[in-house]
Image (cartoon, helix red, strand yellow):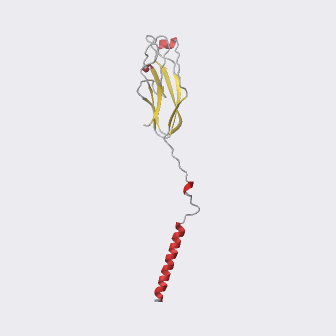
């Protein structure tokens, strides 16, 4: 019986030692961060398009009117985004305001090495891309002139829509 008590005491001692070790290792260490020291943030999708000017003026001279084209004007645009994007351009109405209803398609635009394209009220893709910071997209404009239709007077076209959207 003495032998059984000795074994029971030994098992009891081992159980207490094992429990003490488990409690020791389960206790939080002082080197671990506390829950209230965590940092958290949520970054949203960003697609930003900036233009260097909001107004473009053309003043064609006699030579330009006879040749049928204005000089080109440049609008510098810049894209900043942290997600994929599509950059489009389009007119917002079919005609200019002025002495006659000059069509929007008389406005021509181009980016980079592309050929000039006629502006329409349907969006045309200027470029597509992914994350970037202040990427330049210079857009050139020129106006088709017709001496037989472009009678003297002031012409206005409001607005050309430059837009940056999700693909």
Give the x, y percent position of residue 72: 51, 21
Nearest the eye: 40 or 113: 40
Residue that protrudes farthest toward the right in the picture: 30
Q: Residue at x 47, y 82 (%)?
A: 8
Give the x, y percent position of residue 71: 51, 18
Q: Please state the total of marks drawn on the protein image.
A: 0
Nearest the eye: 19 or 106: 19
Q: Quadrant of the C terminus?
A: top left
Up the image or down, 109 lies above or below 24; here it is above
Residue that protrudes farthest toward the bottom in the picture: 1
Give the x, y percent position of residue 37: 57, 54
Residue that protrudes farthest toward the front in the picture: 36
Q: Residue at x 51, y 12 (%)?
A: 63
Give the x, y percent position of residue 62: 51, 11
């Amino acid at each position: 019986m003495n032998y059984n008590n000795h074994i029971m005491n030994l098992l009891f001692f081992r159980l207490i030692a094992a429990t003490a070790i488990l409690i020791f290792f389960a206790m939080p260490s002082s080197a671990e961060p506390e829950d209230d020291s965590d940092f958290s943030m949520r970054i949203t999708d960003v697609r930003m398009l900036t233009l260097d000017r909001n107004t473009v003026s053309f003043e064609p001279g006699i030579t330009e009117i006879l040749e049928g084209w204005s000089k080109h004007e440049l609008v510098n645009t810049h894209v900043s985004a942290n997600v994929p994007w599509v950059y489009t351009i389009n007119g917002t109405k079919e005609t200019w305001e002025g002495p006659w209803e000059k069509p929007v398609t008389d406005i021509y635009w181009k980016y980079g090495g592309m050929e000039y394209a006629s502006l329409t009220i349907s969006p045309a893709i200027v470029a597509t891309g992914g994350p970037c910071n202040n990427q330049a997209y210079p857009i050139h404009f020129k106006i088709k002139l017709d001496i037989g239709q472009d009678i003297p007077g002031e012409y206005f076209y409001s607005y050309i829509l430059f837009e940056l959207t999700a693909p």
